[in-house]
Amino acid sequence: MSSKENSNIVNSTYKGLLAVTLVLFSVFIFKTLLFSFEIHSYEDHDKKLTENKLFAEDDNESPSSEGDSTAIERKKNSSDKQNTEQKNIIKDLTVKQKIVNINESSEDELNKLPGIGPKTAKKIIDYRKENGAFQDKNDLLKVKGIGPSKLKKIEDLIKLK
């Protein structure tokens, strides 16, 4: 084989590889552009919305049979129950605990503090009668039954004056 034939073979191979690469790249770009958009029907979209309960069925629909009316009624009851539960959760989160004055509070008011039961409330009142008003929140540690952890739970819920 002559050098001229070798040169022609190399050129042909190079051009062939270049052509194959160009074709593969074109196919890749074509497939990417053609199939990059997912096609959904409206039915699929509606199904997803109802499965995720983003939209409830229209309450004004007239049921076609008795089974439909019970299903709608069940859905309404379930919705009402969820609304009530959500309102209760919101109420629990937004209601603030009343601040209790430990120098003037009654046994009932002290009982409302977390971790303070009737016995401990009585001990607080007895301590107050024997030693006078609490000067500092940490003075509660002198009451039998109140330790550092219980004081930490109630310190934001009590005041001295």
Image (tube, rainbow, N blue to C red):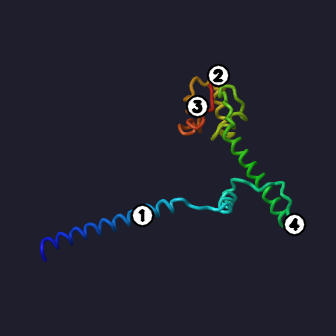
Residue 64: percent from left, percent from top:
86, 65
Residue 9: percent from left, percent from top:
21, 72
Q: Count numbered badges in the picture.
A: 4
Dot 1 and dot 2 residues touching (CB under 8 Å): no
Q: Callout 3: few (<14), some (14-19), or many (20+) C-alpha neighbours within 10 Å?
A: many
Residue 59: percent from left, percent from top:
82, 54
Quarter of the picture containing the C terminus is: top right
Measuring 22% from the left and 67% from the top, which residue is drawn there? 11
The amino acid beneath tag 1 is: Phe
Between the C-alphas of marks 3 and 1, the distance is 76 Å
Quarter of the picture containing the N terminus is: bottom left
In primary-sequence order, the first of circles 4 and 1 is 1
Between the C-alphas of marks 3 and 4, the distance is 66 Å
In primary-sequence order, the first of circles 1 and 2 is 1
Q: Which residue is mark 1?
A: 28
Disc number lying in front (4 or 1): 1
Q: Callout 1: few (<14), some (14-19), or many (20+) C-alpha neighbours within 10 Å?
A: few
Disc number lying in front (3 or 2): 2
Residue 157: percent from left, percent from top:
63, 32
Q: Secondary structure at mark 2?
A: loop
Q: Secondary structure at mark 1?
A: helix
Q: Which residue is mark 2?
A: 161
Quadrant of the rendered image containing residue 150: top right
Q: Which residue is mark 3?
A: 140
In primary-sequence order, the first of circles 4 and 2 is 4
Q: Which residue is mark 4?
A: 66
The amino acid beneath tag 2 is: Lys
Quadrant of the rendered image containing residue 110: top right
